[in-house]
Amino acid sequence: QAFPVLAHYDWRAEEAQMGRALLAWFPEITEGSAPPPEPAFLHHVCGLLTLADWVGSDRRAFPFEHEFRADYWKTARDRARIRLREIGLAPGALTLRGRPDWALISEHPAPRPAQAAVAGLPVSERDWTHELLVTLLYRGEWSVPRLAQLQPGEKAAPMLLVAEAFSRGNSKTDGFRSRVVPVPKAMVAQMFGARPAEVADGILKDIAAIDLALRNGLAVFAAGGDREKVAKPHYARTQPAREALRRHADAMFFPEIWARMAVTHDSGFTPLRRTFLEALSAHARDEFRTAAPGIPCASLMRPRAEVRGRQALERALARAVAKLKVEVPNDV
């Protein structure tokens, strides 16, 4: 009884008729169950509904139908395909008409100050990764607090490196990020300066070599085993596995710095690097194995593609270990 029945329009009868039409057009809704109310899924659905409402509310594409037609669903689908093609949203036709800047999305000469500020926000979350901490600690972008430095006459003790920050505003639930890095007693006096920066750079290069091996191996797999056909879409499919590998490297990074910093002669440095590379290589093999079932490939070509992808991975891993070099001065 929320809405009155108008003399010229019986909304209850029309609602019942639309309900019967939905059951006829989408019979699967009588058997399906509602998906879990996960935020990411709900956001996608809301976006699709908003887009559909915008496209479907244009009478140039969908002229008003005065009488109900049982076959209108087919008409609507045909008109939707035509309209999506006209506005550039058809599958395979998603191309920008110009540079992705303000002029492409608005007829106003310039954005308002608030809109300009939003454009400056980061598009993804940042966390306290080892890469970010290395940048802050060893790239000259951060001044070491005096209290973090061992003072003359002060007795060394284990420390904690605590990194905390808030997101700049485009995160509502994960806005506060924190990381605690234990610093062994022996490293407190030398954790800042040129030598740890050099050691950190060496570890980053080792990680990059293993990451490249995993990327290239999975890309060859995704390209059907043909290295000549590897392209951007194939590299894109490697991203989840590479992100998982990066998390392993992140957990290993600072313990590896402390271990290499403790070395006083180059004879002990190479074995440490070899152990690190072999451990990270094992993680790369695990991530290749985990990602392999999700790589799309024709069933006939799949065995060959996987073998060649694995071969590319192993060759690159072997090269990374074979290039071991001493990167610290003698008798440091």
Image (cartoon, rainbow, N blue to C red):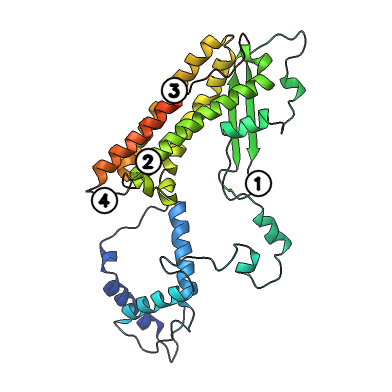
Q: Residues within 10 Å of mark 3 (few under 14, many from 20)?
A: few
State the residue position of label 4: 298
In this rendered view, identify the residue nearer to me: 84 or 316.
316
**Secondary element type, mark 1:** loop
**Secondary element type, mark 2:** helix
* Mark 4 vs mark 3, CA separation in Å: 35 Å
N-terminal label among 1 and 4: 1
N-terminal label among 1 and 3: 1
User: Looking at the rendered structure, which numbered label has been put on residue 218?
Assistant: 2
| Residue at image coords 53%, 25% | 253
N-terminal label among 2 and 3: 2
Task: Please identify, in this view, whether the residue under mark 1 or under mark 4 is nearer the observer.
Answer: 4
| Residue at image coords 52%, 9% | 267
State the residue position of label 1: 168
Q: Position of residue 288 (x, y in %)?
A: 36, 36
Q: Residues within 10 Å of mark 1 (few under 14, many from 20)?
A: few
What is the residue that sits farthest to the front in this orientation? 228
* Mark 2 vs mark 3, CA separation in Å: 21 Å
N-terminal label among 1 and 2: 1
In this rendered view, identify the residue nearer to me: 283 or 152.
283
